[in-house]
Image: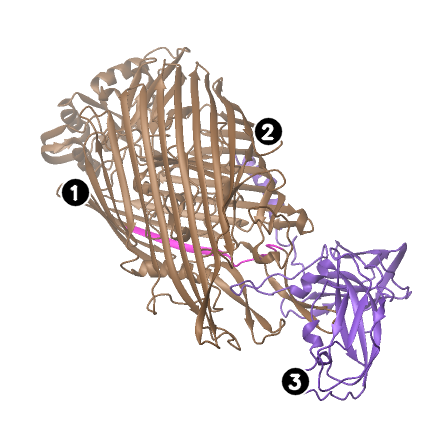
Chain colours: A purple, B brown
Amino acid sequence: MKYYLAIILLSVFPSCSKRFEELPVESTVFVGILRAGEPIANLEFFYLDENTGEQKSIETNALRIDGGGTTHLLVQDNNDFYFNVDSILLTTNTEYTLTGKFQNGDIQATCKTPPAIAPEPFLSADTVTINTDLSDSPVILLSWTALDPADYSYILRLDNLEENPTEIPLTGESGNFYVQFSGPQEAPGIALYETDFKYYGLHRLTVYAIEKSFEEVFFFDSSDGRGLLKNGPDNVDGAKGYFTGVSSFSIDLLLE
Amino acid sequence: MHLMRLLGSILLLMANCSLEAQQMTCKVSATYVDLPLNLVFNDLSNQCEVQFAYDSYAVRSAKITATFENVALNLALEKILSQHQLSFKEISKTIVIIPEQEFETIAKDSTATAVPAVEQFLIRGEIRSAETNEILPFANVQLYTTSQGTTSNSDGKFAFTIENTKNDSIEISYIGFEPLLIAVSAIKENTYRKYYLEERKSYLPSIIIDAERIKLIQIGPKPSQLILDPNNLAIAQGTGEPDVMRAAQLLPGISATQESSSGLFIRGSASDQTLITLDGFTLYHLDHFFGTFTALNTNAVKTMRLMKGSLEAEYGNRIAGVAEVIGKEGNLKKKSAQIDIGALSIGGVLEGPLDKKGKASFILTGRRAYTDLVFSPTYKGIFNTTYNAAITTSASGNEQTFGGAQDPQFYFGDANVKLTYRPNDKTIFNLSGYTGKDHLFISYADTSDDEVINLTDKKYLDESTWQNAGVGARWNTEWTSKLSTELQAGCSVFKTNFFTRDSTFSPLSQTFEASDFNNEQTSVNDFNLKLLSFYRTKNHLTKTGIQLNNITTERAFGENSPLNSAQSQSGTITSFFIQDEWKIGKHWTLYPGIRVSIYNLTNVKAYPEQRINLMRSNMKGTFTWKFSVSRVHQFIHRIRSQSLYLNNPDYWKLSKDNELPVKNSDQFVAGFIFKKKNFTLDAEAYAKTVNRNSTYLGVYNGYSQTFATDTFNTQGLIVGNGTALGADFLLQYDEGRHHAWAGYSILEAQTRYEELDNEIVPESFADLHEFKIYYEVETKRWDFSLLWVYGSGKPYTPYLGNYYVDLLNGEQRKIPMYGDLNSAQLPAYHRLDAGLSYSFVLGDARGKIALSCYNIYNQRNVRDRQYLIQRFGNEPNDYNVVQREVYMLGVLPSLSIQFKF
């Protein structure tokens, strides 16, 4: 009798005894945006400390990005960001695949840099004279290469390049650009008004084409209707995080 | 002739183990005047410290008038028993009372040649309660020496082919009844006969017959089968109401740490993978009070047969197991009534014969919660627990719902009715019906101070109704002693109506502006028709049948809007099955079976399933091997809502190509049953696959990872392939007034989901280790029971922290991050329950007062961990995350009173 019992116990227990030990909490994160026309830089690979939630950098030489017929090996810089020492420029409309290993787990993610975008011939002005009395007409009309709206949308960024910018003395609202264009847009063009600006001087307007799926990061609402925390967007297999590609162009504007 | 139902020749085989001479010459002194014989035995038992065994039904009318003064026990017995043509035999420290006629037969048999006759013959009959004449379904019928045998069917009928050794006996046992031993020699071949069992009554003085054989759980004749009567478990009132499902959860292999009566989680499977039937119709929603206890009234339940896998070919469409609940048929001898006053509800039972010949009977049970009228401490305790599990407005989780501006309005009710008509011994008609309803109206407000900046105050309003109803009809007839037919028809309806409205305070208008938050209506309609035939030969019992099951589901849903028009599905499963019970020699029994289901909503139309069970017993019946291989498909699934209780109800959905695939499971079971004196050990190891298992991701789904979309809005529903590997051990101890069992389960259940990077996800409802100990002692009037449950902790999905993604426009977005699904473990679950009851007789009425206490030491068991957002500004990143423990029930005393007259 005891032999029968022993056989059953031995056949069952070993397979069940290490359930949670074999399934450690996955807390590694990879965050990276590939910018066409630039070398790979500023990619993050870290884990969240289970107790404090702090980001702890992971040092590894097992990360690589393949795409465009080239393998890019990633190493860490002094700030714990990963980059490609070869400084090879990424190309547009190219699929890139991230692969890596961490604690015997495979990490993989894929993105595709959008096609190249550039300003269309029509740019109403690159030097803008601000009329503080305001007018109803846009001061800048800009359009650029139209991409398939099913796959891509656009993000706009406006930087003032002056060291000590002077504020425009508008009587009403100003600096509306950051509200108007805080999220992705589908239209391949914009109209800027005087109220969109806040400062005089040299500005750089950058237009990014992004993968449509990247929009979920912009629109992510951290809670459901009754306050429960929702899980964040994630497109990395074997880890958490986000991996995407962008293409872009910039124009400089001088506001007087 | 009742006297024929006495102990058999097995007693003579044991006769060499006689009482010590000292006990038989024990001097007795007593004066008995017209005293019932069983009381005389009781007195003699006390005087001489001996045990008596007898057929209490046979001696029930015997009364004794005699006086003894220092008379030897054997002489006193001779005088007493001769008044009623009885004799006695001393066997194994027990004095067995035997009718003289039977005694002569037995004595004659004992002097017969040692070579037994080898001819086989058929024993047929039905098993009934001696008190009410009701049938006893799933009673054990077996040879005393070898334990080879069978169980009665749901009509209490059995047929059993034995080898006529004449020196053996047939033992008939049923939970809660005293077992009956009948000499094989006293049974005529192929004669249909009724066997009456005496109910075990703690409130009446009685001598326990062969007491170590009275069990609370009966291990079925096939692998993974257990039979129990929830009415016989003293602790069944743990949460204030008797509970069929809670009783089943005390068995190994069935999770007891869910604190939910909404179903049975068998061997790592979700509760929707267990088929639960009442008198032949399927029940889709089983609980009252948001899972706190079962909607099935135990007053209406006769017995329950559990199959933890290893299904018979007759059953399908659920991959984990079957709980077959048989309703009471009602007292066939006299009308009786019962009133129950519990901690939450008032109920009653009315039963009795419908004719003078005892051929027809009825039973009507009903109960209605008074929770909308009286807020008892038990009710408040349960409601606050469920309420705090549902709301997400407070991180503390200690909100009190009573005593405020508006108390919650909640009630439930249910009713069962069953009519039975047996025009003769060969034909039975049953009609059984059930209806139940839960209704909740609750409003609550978020005025929490947890938030750093309380930007908006909100008021929430939830109104929910659950309704369940079913009716089943059954006709069974025996055409010949070998052939019988049964026709079952059942219809079941389950409906939910869920309405929520949120009101947000507007600083501008200084009023609350209301808007629909989430509205949902769902329903399941199930129609079932089954035709079975049974054909018996000497070594075979062959069951063949056809089943037609039509299921229609509907769901209308509106999120932040009124209800959309209802989406509906309708599917039909037509099944053919055949199963044999094949006795191979003295040791082996093989149950080969096959079931083929035709399903109309998938491109694959035919789903074959094999069911093979094999048992091997040794000669003494003390050791039995059991093996089983089975495959089952499941065509309907319950989609689990992310919410716990008060929010959206779960809904049912049929399998369909490109939407929700058909689940299937292969299961292999190997185990043994070992009996030694008062102990029985039942051990089973199993391995099973669950292919195309589905789960709902809820908040884990995040923003827009839509894995499956269809008209049923199953966003966040993912499908994977799972495995469950484990073992169940049940050690029973039954002796005299003491009953105990210990159950231990070890289980690893997990599913691999392709959509989750092929992650291996542990099942959220499975503890790796689960341990249960139950002890019960009964005296003449008192019953006392203790239950301790331990679970090593369920998996949950932890929140790990945040990371940031560059949005390219100069901003960063804070991204919260959960760990892998079910990758962390909740604290261990444990609790201790106790029950104490006192039975009394008041005139013609019998009464019972039961006091029970759930979770005596108030263990704060964690059901789940939730993560709540606390905002401190208007920007998307302006929030903190706080963890909230969702607790289960704390200490919960309850009192109930029962009168039967």
Q: Which mark is residue B502?
A: none
- Residue B766's x, y, as percent? 53, 49
Residue B466 or B679: which is nearer the viewer? Answer: B466
Residue where numbered disc 1 is placed: B845
- Residue A198's x, y, as percent? 73, 83
Disc 2 marks a residue whose amino acid type is: Lys
Disc 1 marks a residue whose amino acid type is: Ala
Choose mark 2 or mark 3, whichever is in front: 3
For image coordinates 71% across by 73% down, the residue present is: B811
Which residues are drawn in magenta? B821-836
Q: Report if the CB atoms under discs 2 and 3 are less than 8 Å apart.
A: no
The chain identifier of the residue carrying mark 3 reads A
Q: Report if the CB atoms under discs 1 and 2 are less than 8 Å apart.
A: no
Image height of A140 relative to A10, above or below: below
Q: CA distance from mark 1 to mark 2?
A: 58 Å
Task: Give the residue at the far front of this rendering.
Answer: A136
